[in-house]
Every structure is written in structure tokens, then in C-alpha cells.
């Protein structure tokens, strides 16, 4: 069934509002429901009416999703029958970055509910007498070699004498499965265990609301403490740390440059952490560095260190104001006096 056929089946114009569309569908259901209409074609017409209505509703829901640019917050008018409104509870896993920055997810799923047309029995009652008991609700069965007869409740009609057939709405299953697709905006600062309520949205005959339990996935780099502080511990080259070089640091927004300081092992990055409240400003991000030095047993490394030490000593001798040079001169004078005193003895 295409869109034009769906509108023609319901007898409405494509410009009709959602409220008018629902009102028309309800009038047609009331007129053609097999329990109220004894016409032989009522069941077939009822299936076409529901199929057309569901087709139009899914089409309009898809158009709303495409233009919403985020959270699907529009809630339809509440139905008169509360049994048509259901809440589906499910878990949603988010990465730590998604929880920090906020994100939009498209959620798909299905919801199974009892068929309202047959009240879950899978059958509908016809305005005809049962073929088995001829409307009496009971059948006779022979007992004691056919000398006596007993009456038992008719199993085909349940004892009420009315004919039954498989429900055409649920195909005799007693349940209807309604598929849904929702675009949901998760706000920045949502935490593990938070439960978010999404307003109801119409999907065919059913209005479905979502209860989403958030689960934050473990992160390979960042840790979020119970105090809400975002932290990261990263190894750095020990010589780069000593020389105050720049290094790349991971943040929720990507890699950023940070200058090392050999007098510090912990660094605070303002406004780069986890939001202090839901939708609130972001807190600080603490980066702890662990200087790592290579194994000094390597001959090449030993030679490089010797060159570094020799170069440093030359710099000390050239600049008399350096603390190391001053110390060496004091040490030399003391050593000379000490040797003189030892020679006199």
C-alpha cells in the first residue's frame, strides 16, 4: 500500500492534521470492527484501515525525525484509552566522551503488547451460531457403551454458543508487535545509572514512551572519580620532562598540547573535565605524568650521558655564577686547606 492509497482508504486529504487523522481512524474502527459490524467484509476492511493508518503514522514520524535535529520531544495528544499508551524500559550504553559532551542517538526497537481487538485470545466472536454445538453451548457425548449420554461444554465456542474465528488483526497470535524508531538527545553530564524519560510518540495504534537507563562504558584512558573529577595518568619521556618539552595530551575534545615542567607531576586543565551538573559547565581535568627513563645499561646511552655531563661541566666553568660552579670552587678551597692541615700533622 502506497501513501496515496493509504489516504484514500481513510478518506482524508494529505493535508489533514494529526488530530483529525486520529479522529477519522477511530470513527472507521468503531464502524468496521468485526465485533460491531456483522458484514462479511468487515474483517478485511478493518485490516486495510489499520494498515493505512499505520503507514501514514510511520511516514509522518519519519518526517519529524528528519527535521528535528536532535531530541524527539513532541508528544502526541494522549489517547482516550490508557491501554494504548505503553512505556518501554531499556538500557543505553554511552562512551565517556558522549556523556561529557552530550550526544544524539537513534534508537530502534520493538514493543509487544496484547491485541486489543481480541483481548489477547487470538480469536474474535462472530454473530453466528457455533457449527459444533449449533448455538447451544454444549455437546452430547456417549457414556457406558452408548446407553447413556452426557452433555459437556463445547470446546470450540467455550460454551457460549457463538462461532469464533482467528483474529485478523493479530493473525491469531493474541499479541501485536509495534516497531519504533526514536532520535534521542542525551544531555551533557549524564552519569552511569541515570534514568531519562522520553515523551510518548505514536507508532501505529500504540503510543510508546521510553525509560532509558544510562550505562557508561569503561574508558581505556580517562577515569571518572566518585567526586566527579576526570583524571588521566600518562607516562612521558623522562628527558623531555626534565627539558620542559611540549607533549600531546588526550582530552575529551581530542589531543591537545601541554608543556611539561620538571617541577610538577600533576597538571590541571581548566574546563576540560566532566560537567559539574547535568547540562552544567565542565569542571577541571587532572593529568598526572609519570616520567620514564630508558635503561642506562645500553653503551650508546652511556656515551651520550658522558657527553652531556662533559658539556655541562664546560658550561659551569664558563659561567662562574652558576650554583654548581660556586659549589665546586668552595669544595676545591676546602679540600686544599684540608690537605695542608693533614701535611702539617
Image (cartoon, rainbow, N blue to C red):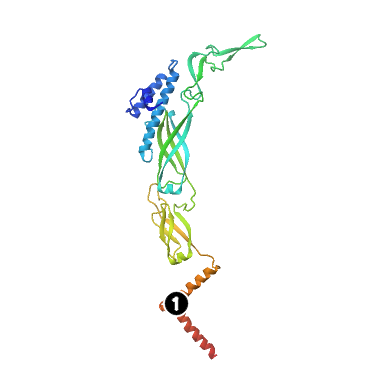
Q: Nearer the viewer, residue 137 or 323?
A: 323
Q: Height in image: 301 above or below 63? A: below
Q: Is residue 21 visible?
A: yes
Q: How many marks?
A: 1
As drawn, which residue projects farthest toward the front?
300
As drawn, which residue projects farthest toward the right?
145
User: Which part of the image, by quadrant, shows the C terminus?
Assistant: bottom right
Q: Nearer the viewer, residue 214 or 300?
A: 300
Image quadrant where residue 196 sits: top left
Q: Which residue is mark 1?
A: 314
Q: Nearer the viewer, residue 183 or 285?
A: 183
Q: Is residue 33 visible?
A: no
Image quadrant where residue 203 sits: top left
Q: Position of residue 107 (x, y in %)?
A: 44, 38
Q: Height in image: 270 above or below 205? A: below
User: Which part of the image, by quadrant, shows the N terminus?
Assistant: top left
Q: Nearer the viewer, residue 4 or 300?
A: 300
Q: Position of residue 222 (x, y in %)?
A: 47, 53
As drawn, which residue projects farthest toward the top?
147
- SS for dot 1: helix
Q: Height in image: 60 above or below 307? A: above
Q: Position of residue 256 (x, y in %)?
A: 41, 56
Q: Residue at x 35, y 28 (%)?
A: 19
Q: Position of residue 13 (x, y in %)?
A: 33, 25
Tag 1: Cα neighbours inside 10 Å, few (<14), some, or many (≥20)?
few
As drawn, which residue projects farthest toward the left?
15
Q: Height in image: 272 above or below 128? A: below
Amino acid at each position: 500500500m502506497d501513501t496515496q492509497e493509504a489516504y484514500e482508504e481513510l478518506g482524508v486529504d494529505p493535508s489533514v492534521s494529526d488530530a483529525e487523522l486520529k479522529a477519522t481512524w477511530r470513527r472507521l474502527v468503531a464502524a468496521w470492527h468485526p465485533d460491531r459490524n456483522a458484514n462479511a467484509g468487515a474483517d478485511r476492511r478493518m485490516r486495510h484501515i489499520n494498515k493505512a493508518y499505520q503507514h501514514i503514522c510511520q511516514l509522518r514520524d519519519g518526517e519529524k525525525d528528519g527535521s528535528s535535529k536532535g531530541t524527539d520531544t513532541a508528544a502526541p495528544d494522549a489517547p482516550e484509552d490508557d491501554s494504548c499508551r505503553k512505556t518501554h524500559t531499556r538500557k543505553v550504553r554511552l562512551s565517556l566522551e558522549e556523556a561529557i559532551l552530550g550526544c544524539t542517538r537513534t534508537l530502534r526497537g520493538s514493543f509487544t503488547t496484547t491485541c486489543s481487538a481480541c483481548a489477547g485470545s487470538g480469536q474474535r466472536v462472530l454473530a453466528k451460531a457455533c457449527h459444533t454445538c449449533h448455538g447451544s453451548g454444549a455437546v452430547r457425548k456417549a457414556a457406558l457403551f452408548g446407553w447413556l449420554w452426557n452433555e459437556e461444554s463445547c470446546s470450540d465456542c467455550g460454551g457460549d454458543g457463538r462461532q469464533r474465528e482467528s483474529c485478523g488483526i493479530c493473525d491469531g497470535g493474541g499479541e501485536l508487535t509495534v516497531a519504533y524508531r526514536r532520535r534521542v538527545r542525551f544531555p551533557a553530564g549524564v552519569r552511569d545509572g541515570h534514568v531519562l524519560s522520553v515523551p510518548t510518540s505514536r507508532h501505529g495504534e500504540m503510543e510508546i514512551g521510553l525509560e532509558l537507563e544510562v550505562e557508561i562504558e569503561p574508558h581505556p584512558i580517562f577515569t571518572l572519580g566518585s567526586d566527579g573529577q576526570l583524571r588521566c595518568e600518562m607516562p612521558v619521556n623522562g628527558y623531555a620532562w626534565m627539558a620542559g618539552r611540549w607533549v600531546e595530551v588526550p582530552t575529551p575534545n581530542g589531543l591537545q598540547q601541554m608543556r611539561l615542567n620538571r617541577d610538577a607531576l600533576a597538571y590541571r586543565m581548566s574546563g576540560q573535565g566532566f560537567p559539574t551538573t547535568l547540562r552544567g559547565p565542565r569542571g577541571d581535568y587532572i593529568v598526572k605524568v609519570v616520567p620514564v627513563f630508558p635503561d642506562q645499561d645500553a653503551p650508546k646511552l652511556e656515551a651520550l650521558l658522558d657527553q652531556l655531563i662533559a658539556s655541562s661541566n664546560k658550561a659551569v666553568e664558563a659561567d662562574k655564577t652558576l650554583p654548581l660552579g660556586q659549589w665546586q670552587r668552595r669544595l676545591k678551597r676546602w679540600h686544599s686547606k684540608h690537605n695542608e692541615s693533614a701535611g702539617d700533622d
